[in-house]
Amino acid sequence: MNAPHELDELGVRVPPAAIEMEQSVLGALLLDNDAIDRIGDLRAEHFYRYEHRLIFETIQKMLMASRSADVMTVFEWMQSAGTLDRTGGLQYLNALAGTAMGSANIARYAQIVVDRWKLRGVLAALDEVGAMVHNRNGREVGEIIAEAQTRLESLADTAVQAPQLAAAGLAELVTELDAQFHGTPTSATVVKTGFTDVDRKLDGGMRGGDLVVVAGRPSMGKTAFSMAISDHAAAHAGPALVFSIEMPTKQLNMRLLARAGNLPIGKLKDGSKMEDGDWPKLTRAVQHISDLPLYIDESGSVSLPDIVSRARALKRREGLSLIVVDYLGLVKLGKEERHDLQIAAVTRGLKELAKQLDVPVLLLCQLSREVEKRPNKRPQMSDLRDSGAIEQDADVILFLYRDEVYHRDTADKGVAEVIFAKQRNGALGKVGLAFVGDHAKFADLDAGRLLGSSESRATRARGFD
């Protein structure tokens, strides 16, 4: 009945364990079977000593079978099962019950047992990470760090949540609805895109924990669209993090300046084209962007573990409202055998990251060339490359389409369609935005000629919601 110490009698360090607490839990259960309702999420695997796991499993099985579990009945059950010799026999069962201090504090005893199990898990995780460090097998440093973070954080989230009555969360939901109705802040994470009709279609904006996919063919404006959302999020919701895998920061900054200063990109590429009236616009744009907590990572080739570790680090340091990944096709893939499984690992990982950090993740994707083979070039779900994994993990899928890319004489010049192809908790359909290409700028449609208002007759005629 001795508890181990940090060092044994030979000076050897032993794993964290609470042997006396394990004995107290088992003894209390032998004396008071009803106490099993007060041990929380304690499981057999949480016990350090093998014989304690066997005894606990036996008590659980007997109680599930509506059998009384005292010293003698447990003795008989284990004898019949052939496990008695591995638990110390009747003498040890008597010792457990005889030294128990009752069941009043069993919940605390059980928690201590679980905590020691978690500490053993920490040591095991550190050992495994240490082995990765010494035997990298091609792993990047960022991948090892992210793996270490994931393993340690998983230990903090091992409790099994007990089932709740359906009505348990109603009060919180009604309170949130009331706050939204009166325009007061709520605890729910909602990040607006900055586009009136898009936010309306999203029932207020993007939700924390959501994976939002923006897909389109080249030249549709995916990067410009995502940077407009990032700008708005950083200005109104908090720090935003953009992984610009394809485009270097200099080009992104040009687009940001063009949008914020209402300046043609051509002038920002060639200063000789600047005019006197452009400089005040540029100054205001630079000040606007300088004031934004907008972070751009242009590492060029990042893996999912890189994205996870850098996003978590920024969240800890500064807070975080939005993550943008531009784009899926350039994320460094893992070692799964099939390409579709590699893509699935990335989308699943980004969805999990969104949930863990309680922020929306905006993921840009290319569409397949099959679009070009159809008379109607508007995207369909089947046009998504590796669409199975993306469709399964995404909460929202938006397609960008500009008819003028294919038809120069279209009546919809300067108009972009945002097609809601999937929305887990909302309606499908499409909304219109204005697009000014040489300013890399999306904006709400004018309620008149450019069809911004959903009440506009012209808007309804073109099929926008």
Image (tube, rainbow, N blue to C red):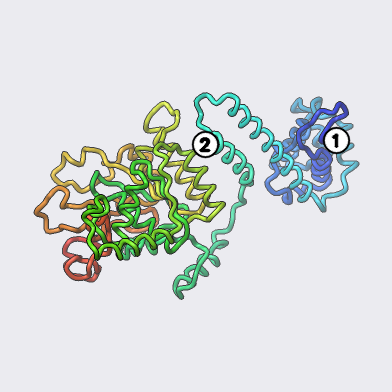
Q: In this view, does 146 lie above or below 188?
A: above
Who is closer to the viewer here, 205 or 25?
A: 205
For the residues bearing labels 2 and 1, Cβ distance under 8 angstroms = no
Amino acid identity at mark 2? Gly
Residue 258 is at least partly visible in this image:
yes
Residue at 55 percent across and 26 percent down: it is: 136
The residue shown at (16%, 64%) is: 461
Q: Where is residue 228 in the image (x, y as percent from the top left)?
A: 34, 57
Q: Mark 2 points at which residue?
A: 142
Instruction: Specify the quadrant that holds the C terminus.
Output: bottom left
**Tag 1: amino acid:** Leu
* Viewport quadrant of the N terminus: top right
Crowdedness of circle 1 by 10 Å Cα count: few (<14), some, many (20+)?
Answer: many
Position of residue 63 in the picture relative to residue 95 (left or right)? left
Determine the residue positioned at 25% across, 57% down.
439
Mark 2 element type:
helix
In the displayed structure image, the side of residue 281 where residue 188 appears, left or right: right
Q: Where is residue 241 in the image (x, y as percent from the top left)?
A: 44, 51
Specify the quadrant of the image occupied by residue 263: bottom left
Residue indicated by mark 1: 93
As helix, strand or loop, the secondary structure at mark 1 comes to helix
> Considering only order in the chain, which callout, 1 or 2, is on the residue closer to the N terminus?
1
- Looking at this view, name the residue that lies furthest to the bottom: 182
